[in-house]
Amino acid sequence: MLLLGIDLGTSSIKASVVDAETGQVLSQAQYPEKETGIKALQPGWAEQNPDEWWENVQGAIRKATVGNDFAPTDIAAIGIAYQMHGLVTVDSNGNALRDSIIWCDSRAIPYGEKAFQQIGEERSLSHLLNSPGNFTAAKLAWVKEKEPQVFQKIAQVMLPGDYIALKLTGQATISPSSLSEGIFWDFQDEAISQDVLQAFGFEKSLIPTVQPTFSEHGYLEQNIAEALGLKAGIPVSYKSGDQPNNALSLNVLQPGEVAATAGTSGVIYGISDQLTYDPQSRINTFAHVNHSGYQKRLGVLLCINGTGILNRWLRDTVAPGVGYAQLNEEAASVAPGSDGLLVLPFGNGAERMLGNKLIGAHLHCLDLNLHSRAHLIRAGQEGIAFAFRYGLDIMRENGMNPAIIRAGKANMFLSPVFTEAFVNVTGVPVELYPCDGSVGAALGAGIGAGIYKTEEEAFRNMKPLALVEPGALQPRYEELYQQWKKALLQHF
């Protein structure tokens, strides 16, 4: 029995086929080969085409299932992970009405702030565990005001993964976890927030059917199954935002457990059983994949928009055509501190942990006679690690004090320089695992379809690759971090 996991990322789509019994990854694919761009029609805007996602999902599935030593018709369930906080609007036929306003778009901040004041700061934080900010609900408010001709045609609103499930099954559903990341969920009432609907003037009918994360969200339609070489009628049995899914893929499900990821954006995600919130809303609390009314499981999330995207920008700008592995080697040839060069990585939209400010990315102390390409790459990776430390200190203020962090050996964690900087500047060991979001989505599908009797059963074969611990460089990285933080505070 096989499981198919889909990870709808910002840069590309990944698909994995997993043997449900052994947990072995039989096939993985990424599509398209070239990283997908982000449309920025104005400064601070970020959009992508949902139909392009759908085309790329189909390409990734075909690439992962064709020409392998297994029968694609043995796939018994599908799971979907997706970039969080995006807004997809569809008409009564399920067609996307406009490009998706994605997670790093900043245009809706004034709408979220107005609703925050209208609902009341204390009530908003205690019921939503967040301010509306520039999340999905606020983005919909922008569409309502700025594009009324589009808003009038909207039959339903959804998150990116919900749209892909709709294309696969013809059925629209959404989960409390997804609604919470869109700031539509009231944790006191365990229901769609009436406060948010009233503040923005939305009808409840815009929200699809609400179902648990682990449940059957529709069945693969005959024509789609034929086009993809799969068996018709298999369920989409799991949908989750990428960060809750990343935590699931690392078996981070219980209070006190913490996961991290450093892809296009960077995240530290810890599990709590308390309805906690940051009074300044610099970090966010969402319903985790296993949250329910009788068992509270909240994901406390620090998000840094500008992480891997900075690393990619540096590669494309100063080393076009050079692979990340070579650049990581070059960065390792430079001593910690990059000979005084400092990089602030905040160039991908307003940063929640900086009070929703859009400060841009910055180079400090660039010496044109000293600093090389290797210095730029190392300083960029160290700057990303320092941003994680800045955010982790906010999490510590709010009672999240990880003793160890689990991460997939992927993206920035493939760089020894970044990993070394991360553990030494945070003072927290990192346990690295051979997993990614599409594998986690496949295992989630197995849980949702009842193929695994328990969550624990899904991860019985998971073993760490390595443990990276802080060492003698801790004092040096603390000194460097304080210099970096001083540079950051100049921009407030």
Image (cartoon, rainbow, N blue to C red):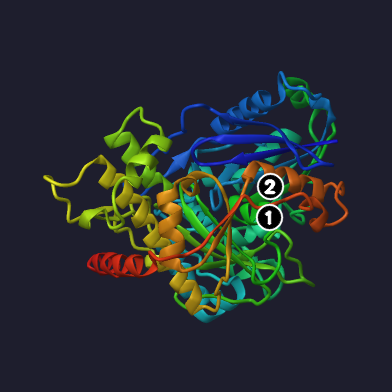
The answer to whether 350 appears left or right of 94 in the picture is left
Q: Position of residue 488 (x, y in %)?
A: 28, 65
Q: Which residue is mark 2?
A: 440
Q: Earlier in the sequence, mark 2 or mark 1?
A: 1
Q: Amino acid at mark 2?
A: Gly
Q: Residue at x 44, y 46 (%)?
A: 415
Q: Position of residue 128 (x, y in %)?
A: 59, 71
Q: Looking at the image, is 343 positioned above or below residue 441?
A: below
When the figure is inspected, residue 309 is found, relative to residue 399, above or below; the finding is above
Q: Residue shown at 21%/57% (left/top)?
A: 340
Viewer can see residue 234: yes
The residue furthest left is: 369
| Residue 215 appears anywhere in the view | no
From this viewpoint, which residue is outermost toward the front? 472
Question: In which quadrant of the rendered view does residue 38 lie?
Answer: top left
Determine the CA span between mark 2 and mark 1. Answer: 6 Å
* Picture layout, residue 178 above or below residue 217: below
Q: Horizontal and vertical percent for residue 220?
A: 79, 33
Name which residue lies at 74% across and 49% down.
Answer: 444
Could you tell whether 210 is left or right of 40 in the image?
right
Residue placed at 26% from the left, 53% from the top? 338
Query: In the rendered image, which residue does mark 1 sit on?
Result: 248
Q: Is residue 453 above or below residue 333?
A: below
Residue 120 appears at what percent x and percent y? Answer: 50, 78
390 vs 164, left or right, is left
Q: Residues within 10 Å of mark 2 (few under 14, many from 20)?
A: many
Give yes or no for contact between labels 2 and 1 (Cβ–Cβ under 8 Å): yes
Image quadrant in which the N terminus is located = top right
In the rendered structure, which amino acid carries the disc numbered 1? Leu
Residue placed most toward the observer, 50 or 417: 417
